[in-house]
Image (tube, rainbow, N blue to C red):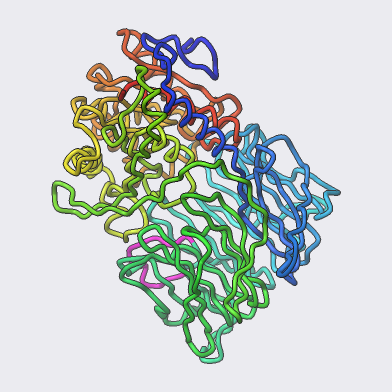
Amino acid sequence: MNVGSVRTGGAASVTSSADVRPSVTTRAAADLGERLAAAWGSWGPTMTRNARRVAFVSDRHGTPEVFVQDVVVDGELPEPVRIALSDDPVIRVSWSSDGEWLAVAIATDGGVKQQVWVVRPDGTDAAQIAGSRYQHAELGPWSRSGHRVVITLPSTEPDQPARSYLVDPVSGDRDDLAVGELIHILDLSVEERLVVLSDGQRGQEFVVVVDRLTDESHALFADDPDGSAEIAFLRPSPASETSPLVAYVATEAGLPRRGLVAQPVGPHGWRGTPRRIIERADAELEYLDADDAGRTLLLVWNVDGRSELDLINMHDASRTPVPDLPGYVVTDPVLSRDGRSVLLAVEGPTRPRELWRLDTNALTWSRVTDVPVLPDATLVEPTLERFGARDGLELTGWLYRAVEPAPSAAEADPVAGAVPPGRAALVHLHGGPESQERPTFSPQHQALAAAGVTVFAPNIRGSSGYGHEFVHADDLGLRWNALADVVDCARFLVSNGYADRSRVAVEGRSYGGYATLASLAFTPDVFAAGVAVCGMSDFATFYRDTEPWIAAAAATKYGHPVDDAALLDSLSPMRAIDDVTAPLLVVHGELDTNVPIGEAHQVVAALRDRSHDVEYLELEGEGHEYRRASSRAMLVRRMVEFVASRLG
């Protein structure tokens, strides 16, 4: 089916953004968005055993690649060395415990499926050990010796299990490790006898310990409390424990919010009494790491979207909050094997991701990677807003207030397509739905604010970061309540004077793209325009066409494609696509097999059949995540011009 005249330009539609000449303000905002999209970052650090060298991922040349450099505490930052493997984007890198190898996950052709490569830290002996265009491969942890790395191959057909292997990077030989429906390997004991893995569907992940010697597996928690767990690892027990090992788990099992639980474990399925180490009523435990001895634990808390760090000494049970975090949001924290330093990525609304080092004794910070020069422009610091949904549930969102243009620009800006400041707004919906909107670096939000459009990025029910009940408050038939939250976000903007009722747009990606389409189809009188990025439009076709392992995991969140077919049909925007009245921009990656591209094609075709105002942008060489800076820049420009022209 031909849904667009050109793959990256989209648009044989009734009305195009090109039909209205962008105003001076809109052009400047789109230019700013492009420059911000080119502002590269660094993330995903992994250290050598002595913590003196770091490998990480950076898109400083436009596409995510692996870089290696020394960690310099005092003095000029060294130039990182690029490790060339493939033209495809890098997703993750992991340094072996013995320092001899890097394992690298790569997005095959830029799409959803991944390959796993191994390479020496100097760039030699590179080899692909798993994954292809037809088989997704997941990179797991290295063994503690560093001689083998874990890979997991999800099912390629419905009802087939996933299989995990230990792979020798030199020979490529594989040893069977574990089999399960939706397994992810989390850790191995030093002698590789015990395997810690997670299994289960979305929101119901549980942790299992497999004894390879006896070929037995046991749930980590004997009483199987309600709640999921996705982070767990083994360390030697503190002196106060009688067991040889303790599994430290970041879990919400039996807790209102995710906290830290210690579970003594041993061979032959032995388990001691679990202990709650720390939990917070105002935060969720997001990241967890430990030194090799199990003496020091690193905890990263999510507090209304901002990050806070703690260091826990397990020998005396003391807790040390870490001061002066050099940014709002932390990702990918790594504690050194001796516990003396931490490397992590940090970012905020006005700065892209960069790597910093924490000295855990002095509690001082030093920058590890260089940063790009940003455009000389006003960037918005969002504020966290709280408001009540129609049923009284408290919701939050980050508000990026529109930037008022300079008087000279406003006077020269009488052209159609200009957006008067403070009068128009856009509701941005994150994906997941279990993701969370946080104060991170967003070229899209900044460019729209520069165009005179206030951006409100809420965490509607179903978002993570607010506890077990909140993240499950949109499961199955409760999804209608989440869609009502979207309408309540528009009401919040109008009632607080951020936008006229007739000038509110809605936009989202992935699940947020679905919620955008649903909002336009089921409540067509609320929003004046929409932008749906890689969103589902019909649950039946989504389940039919997505990857088998994605479909298998999704049933607990959306509904079973057979057992809940009537519910899924009622929630599918395609059933009410003829009710859509607002102009719509549809965006999708050419290689997306998570939310397959047919979800976009059927929306565009249906709207064009009735000559509706719809534009289509297909991003060549991209999957579900848009990893190349050129693609992100194209998307930001197109979105700014579309939204400004429709709300002007």
* Residue that appears at 65% across and 77% down: 340
Q: Position of residue 466 (x, y in %)?
A: 32, 59
Q: Position of residue 354 (x, y in %)?
A: 60, 55
Q: Position of residue 457 (x, y in %)?
A: 34, 44
Quadrant, the C terminus: top left
Query: Toward the viewer: 363 or 257?
Result: 363
Q: Is residue 464 above or below residue 257?
A: above
Q: Is residue 534 magenta?
A: no
Residue 295 vs 209, above or below: the answer is below
At horizontal 46% and vertical 43% (from top left) the residue drawn is: 378
222 within the magenta span: yes
Q: Residue at x 27, y 21 (%)?
A: 582
Dominant SS type (magenta) = loop
Q: Tell me the magenta residue range.
A: 219-230
Residue 148 left/right relative to 594: right
Query: Quadrant location of residue 71?
Result: bottom right
Residue drawn at x 63%, y 80% is 293
